[in-house]
Image: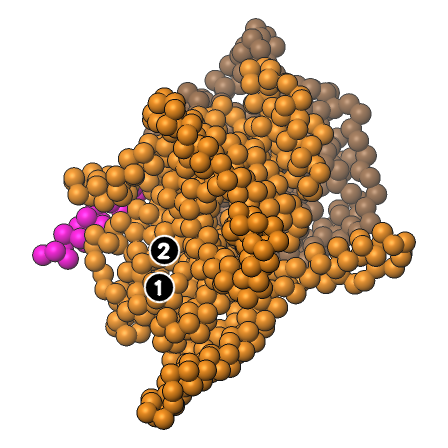
Amino acid sequence: MLFTDSLFIFGLILLFFVYFLIPQKYRWMLLLGASIAFYAYSGVFNLIYIAVTALSTFLITRRMEKMAEAAKESVSAHKSEWSRDEKKAFKEHEKKKRRRWLALLLILNFGMLAVIKYGAFTMNNVNTIIGWFGNRGTLPVPDFLLPMGISFYLFQTMGYAIDVYREKYPCEKNFAKLALFVSFFPQLVQGPISRYDDLAKGLYAGNGFEAERVHLGVQRILWGYCKKVVLADRILPAVTLLISDPEQYQGMYALLGMLYYTLQLYADFTGGIDITIGIGQVLGIPIAENFQRPFFSKNITEYWRRWHITLGTWFKDYLFYPVSVAQPMLKLSKWSRDKLGKNIGKYLPVYVSTLAVWFVTGLWHGAAWNFIVWGMLNAVIILISERLTGLYGKFHAKCGWSNTRAYDGFMAIRTTLMMGCLRMFDCYRDVPLTFRMFGTMFTKWNVQIFWDGSLMKLNLSLADYGVLLTGVLVLFTASMIGRKGSVRKRILGRSRVLSCCMTVALVLIVLIFGAYGIGYDSSQFIYNQF
Amino acid sequence: MANKKVLFAGLAMTLTAGVLLAAYQRLVQPKYMSDVVEGNLIADYYRSGKDHDVLFIGDCECYENFSPVKLWEDYGISSYIRGSAQQLIWQSYYLLEDTLRCEKPKVVVFNVLSMKYGEPQNEAYNRMSVEGMEWSKSKIANIKASMTEEESFLSYVFPVLRYHSRWSELTEDDFRYYFGAEPNFFSGYYLRADAKPAQNVPKGTPLTDYSFSDTCWDYLGRMMQLCAENHIQLVLIKAPSLYPYWYPEWDEQIREYAEKYQLHYVNFLDEDKLAATGLDFETDTYDGGLHLNVYGAEKLSDWFGQYLISKFDLRDRSSEPALANEWADICRRYHAETERQVKNLEQYGNVKGEADASV
């Protein structure tokens, strides 16, 4: 079910009413029911996957917690008998036992993801390699239907399990409540990937009706719909056309396709997240922000701190740090220091960890070489930027003009264009074609398309361009103002009437300028495919 | 107090958005005045009188082939055509139901061409057939039966969901007729005075299956039952349109059905009927045999008027003052429109009276 389906919208309105009408203690149950219904709508069998994740996580985290409690009791019971080293050894031994349970959980769940999402990709590659050796036979390629949002709920749930293993917080004792955390419906489509300690309290509290909060939440939902249906879905036909025929649409068309896709992806993903956070706000459930004006970033490292924030922090906390301090990495560090010198030895483990994280980030986005290359290119650019930090410092110190706002603007545009170029890997069917299309931007100088009427033949009318341009300007202005705090809150603070007018205006904008209904392709949220 | 304020603010916002959207909806809904005027046919009924002895229901073969004015002027028969473009049989059925809420005619004449369509066909035609109806159980059932896969019920309840993007295509008509359309029709008849001879009319290509769908038979049965319950005589007709091709195998099925249920069935494509009506497809059609022009429609109505009088208990009501008064206006507009179109044809070569009009 799409957020843009009328069934979802009516269901959501109904849910809001019922949520505040029923007693507080039953509200989380209503959310669980709604989440199950929402997920079942995408396919009843998909419930099996999410149920396996929820159940296995519940049982194993409970087990790990009991083991940890038992270990603590043992240490406490033998406090006077055991030496410090004995206590440490015992704790380490117990932790190892718990780690085995955690490993079992991670293998089971990520294994499920690997088979469902990456089985076909792996077997296709194996068959290609077999083909290189002249073998004409092929191994069977599995064809699983990817359950909705599996990459999101799995990462969120495994993050919770790792935190319980690390004893960051106690595990959830109520299976139904954990199932709600795993399956909370607004997050299922495209995240964000929340942390248990951030989400659970609001999720189970059943917060009451607060007019101001609900109003702001509704505005956030409407703002999300504006981005999705007015901008992302309006530009979709042009993007589809431009990437569907790479032979015809080269050079400046490829540039246009890249820019259009950048806008589509931004409006689509941030729009969906706005809807999710807005729903949470109405229900009194704080959901983590996933974006912070990413296109204002001065470099790609900063961009990734502002784009899909929850995925970035997940990888940092649960992959980058553990990989960096893992035994093999420490050994590599020691070896490289001894063999390759102090300087290389210092950086090599960081580089390896960074490349590993970006390799997985690429894979997370999709089972295709496009995404892997995309991830690795991100890593390479980030690493090069970091190596050149000193040089940048000297440049900024020497050139005063590089510390102006205009130069900041230039850097933001440069970052946007670089990320747009990298995102071309999302669009084209394979890696060589993507590089070729990127190359045509410099080799095929068909700039006349900007004034000879070609722009009007890209499934966009003059009216569409008008809406898109206005939309981009509004987005930019809102982002500029938003740097000093929530625009909605500031408007509400200034005048309640103005805030109400803005709500009405948002409703009208979505309904009048939205690209929905017959004649438009109702599109899936892009990140739902990852 | 705080709750009251919140409630008031919520209601005020909902109401404001609702009013603005309703106003916008009215603006963007097609007015069907200059182009595709057939879109106004269904709604036009609610502006007319509700005292008709004969009701025609069907597609363009009804509303372009029969002249109620001729039936009135020559036979004193008050009739109305509830037809719309490519009107499917269930749409005809629900329009009959809808009409029976307002009046009870003595005779219902149904054109059987729509028996060939067993499934919803085209959103644009659905809109023209359904949107003009006043809200009733019949309209709801009609929408549900008519929707193609891509359509949604909600967009019929709130047409703004369908027409929201027309803001970029608004014409002068959308503003001029914002508060309502002007009557275009003459008791449901769409008048055309131009002529285009029927030439090289294509023969029907053989079909693999000539049987009508169960859905169509079901609706025909329901139509028959509805008429019987309301003591209305049902007459099945096949209008004399040369195209779409009416297969003998189809005709045979309708004949058998009419015989089985003792219904009247007139196929105007039969040679004897064509001869009796005096139709000449060189001069009496405006689009090469698909539809009759006003001269053809009058010839056909002349014959059909005699048929109705001879077969059913219909009397000349032209002496009834209220009815005569109402019809006088329709007849005046009808003749004025014929005259206008004839003049335009002479002056511009088209009925619209535009130098560059294609028709």
Give the magenta part as a residue range.
Answer: B1-21
Question: Residue placed at 55% from the left, 70% from the top?
Answer: A106
Question: Residue placed at 58% from the left, 73% from the top?
Answer: A108
Q: Compare residues A322 and A444 and report the one nearer the observer.
A: A322
For the question of whether residue B351 can be seen, the reply is no
User: Residue under circle 2?
Assistant: A288
Question: Residue placed at 21% from the left, 52% from the top?
Answer: A212
Give the residue furthest to the left. B1
Mark 1 is surrounded, within 10 Å at the Cα level, by few (under 14), some (14 to 19) or many (20 or more) other residues, namely: some
Q: CA distance from mark 2 to mark 1?
A: 8 Å
A507 inside magenta stretch: no
Marker disc for residue A143: none
Q: Compare residues A336 and A34 and report the one nearer the observer.
A: A336
Compared to residue B76, the image places residue B96 above or below, namely: below
| Mark 1 belongs to chain | A
B8 inside magenta stretch: yes
Three-letter residue code for mark 1: Leu
User: Residue under circle 1?
Assistant: A199
Query: Is B15 left or right of A409, judged from the image as shown?
Result: left
Q: Which chain is orange in the rendering?
A: A
Q: Which chain is brown in the rendering?
A: B
To the question of a shared chain for discs 2 and 1, the answer is yes
Mark 2 touches mark 1? (CB < 8 Å):
yes
Three-letter residue code for mark 2: Ala
**Within the image, what quadrant is residue A374 found in?**
top right
Compared to residue A163, the image places residue A190 above or below, namely: above
Question: Residue placed at 75% from the left, 40% from the top?
Answer: B246
Query: Is A26 left or right of B106, judged from the image as shown?
Result: left
| Mark 2 belongs to chain | A
